[in-house]
Image (cartoon, rainbow, N blue to C red):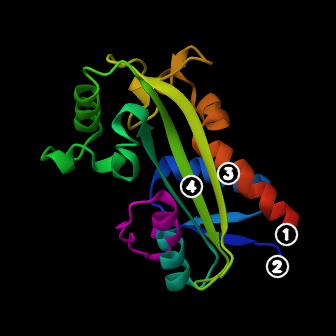
Amino acid sequence: MGSPLKKVVLASNNAGKLREFAALFGAAGIELIPQGQLNVPEAEEPYPTFVENALTKARHAARLTGLPALADDSGLCVHALRGAPGVHSARYAQLAGGEKSDASNNARLVSELQNEADRRAYYFCVLALVRHTDDPEPLIAEGRWHGEILDTPRGEQGFGYDPYFYLPSLNATAAELQPSVKNANSHRAIALRQLLARLSEEA
């Protein structure tokens, strides 16, 4: 559909996401520009699903810049909590009257799972790429990273729920992994590889 993309706005101001995305997109010959550099304010994320929020953020950035835009919406989904914290992962504690912080979110998560035997969980990421604001055929990619929730944190790397997110296949929490290992295995990496494969098919 049209010429290959050269510049894409990233609808995020998260420095960690920018580093990860920029490296992978750079290898594909695409320049990624964080929306903050173009004075794009953050979009609202009012929807109950990851895909709706990701699309909303991508269209918002595309509308204000006139450029193609990429957005992700991601979070932790816990089986015993019927998919929570889900789209509310970043403000899980805040929704229960606590403060908005990683420590408070993790404290609530561990508390909610106190009497649960099923500790299965996965990180989920949806990526949405729109070529222009009203793109009728946005590229959507998704990734899941399966693990378990621990009661005690381990590791100093990463952010969010990473110290409690244990990966049996790697015998480590996400916070114990070096960034290069995490970025090669994570839900975001899986979704990005899928998206870049779709883009290469269009080129």
Residue at point 25% right, 21% down? Answer: 114
Q: Report if residue 41 lies within the magenta region.
A: yes
Q: Which mark is residue 91?
A: none
- Whole-percent x, y for residue 72 in the image: 53, 58
Amino acid marked by disc 3? Leu
- As measured in the structure, the alpha-carbon distance from the residue carrying label 1 to the one carrying label 2 is 6 Å
Q: To which residue does mark 2 refer?
A: 1
Query: Which badge, 3 or 4, comes first in the chain's sequence?
Result: 4
**Residue 16 as seen in the image, left or right of residue 196:** left
The C terminus, quarter of image: bottom right
Label 3 with label 4: CB-CB less than 8 Å:
no
**Residue 160 as seen in the image, left or right of residue 95:** right
Label 1 with label 2: CB-CB less than 8 Å:
yes
Q: To which residue does mark 1 refer?
A: 202
The N terminus, quarter of image: bottom right
Mark 1 neighbour class, 10 Å CA radius: few under 14, some 14 to 19, many 20 or more = few
Q: Report if residue 32 lies within the magenta region.
A: no
Q: To which residue does mark 3 refer?
A: 192
Looking at the image, residue 174 lies above or below residue 87: above
Residue 20 visible, this orientation: yes
Mark 3 neighbour class, 10 Å CA radius: few under 14, some 14 to 19, many 20 or more = many
Q: To which residue does mark 4 refer?
A: 126
Amino acid marked by disc 4? Val
Mark 2 neighbour class, 10 Å CA radius: few under 14, some 14 to 19, many 20 or more = few
Q: Under tag 2, what secondary structure?
A: loop
Residue 28 visible, this orientation: no
* The residue stretch that appears in magenta: 36-55
Query: Which badge, 3 or 1, comes first in the chain's sequence?
Result: 3
Looking at the image, residue 201 lies above or below residue 85: below
